[in-house]
Image (spheres, rainbow, N blue to C red):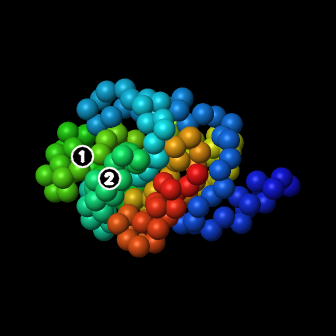
Amino acid sequence: MSVVAAIAKSIIPNTILPRVEAPVSFYDLQFLDINGDLRSMQEFKGKHLLIVNTASKCGFTYQYEGLQELYKTYKEDLEIIGFPCNQFKKQEPAGNDQIAEFCELQFGVKFPMASKIDVKGDNVHPVYNWLTKKEQNGILSSEVEWNFQKYWIDDIGALRAVVYTNVKPNGKKFLKLAEELINEK
């Protein structure tokens, strides 16, 4: 077993992963934004990126507020992309237009939002395929367990953290992780 494989097997969720080169470049991935425009992850090269699966009828929907605070505080170094998903108890039944309006009116969301996608299963979106498959990201296979699970991609396109739903994006634990990753040299 390689050193990286041994490390990956012992990963504790919500901690920083070692930086490894991914077999598949994160920057080759694309997604449709909430307005239906094609976007490339290449646009975000050189910045840290937080990918979050979202839902507007979830007990954790309040995390939009914390995500927006995080975005406002760290927008020079960090981008956030919300990926709406209806796979967890059908908690995102709305269409893209209604999702965009809800996020703007209820939480003042200014960070990019993607069109609604699947984060697991037969129709998993390529971004989430990369996030959850070690064969793609080079470090860790994981499963999206619920809405508002967070994936941190560093400024060179390496998966660095998987943060579960119960960790608030504006809470002390997450802010410590964010500071460490952003200030890492």
Q: Dot 2 corresponds to which residue?
A: 71
Decide: marks 1, 2 in contact (CB < 8 A)?
yes
Question: Which of the two discs, 1 and 2, labels the residue nearer the N terminus?
Answer: 2
Q: Nearer the viewer, residue 154 or 106?
A: 154
Residue 23 % position (x, y): 68, 36
- At label 2, counting other C-alpha atoms closer than 10 Å, the crowd grade (few under 14, some 14-19, many 20 or more) is many
Q: Position of residue 84 (x, y in %)?
A: 34, 47
In which quadrant of the rendered view does residue 165 lie? Answer: bottom left
Which amino acid, by three-letter code, is at mark 2? Answer: Tyr
Determine whether 133 is above or below 145 in the image. Answer: above
Of residues 48 and 59, the one drawn nearer to the viewer in this rendering:
48
Residue marked by disc 1: 110
The residue sitting at 86% across, 55% down in the picture is: 1
Residue at 27 percent across and 50 percent down: it is 93
Q: Secondary structure at mark 1?
A: loop
**Residue 91 seen from this side:** no
Write the residue at 54% across / 66% down.
14
Which corner quadrant of the image does residue 115 belong to? top left
Most distant residue in the top direction: 38
User: What is the count of numbered marks?
Assistant: 2
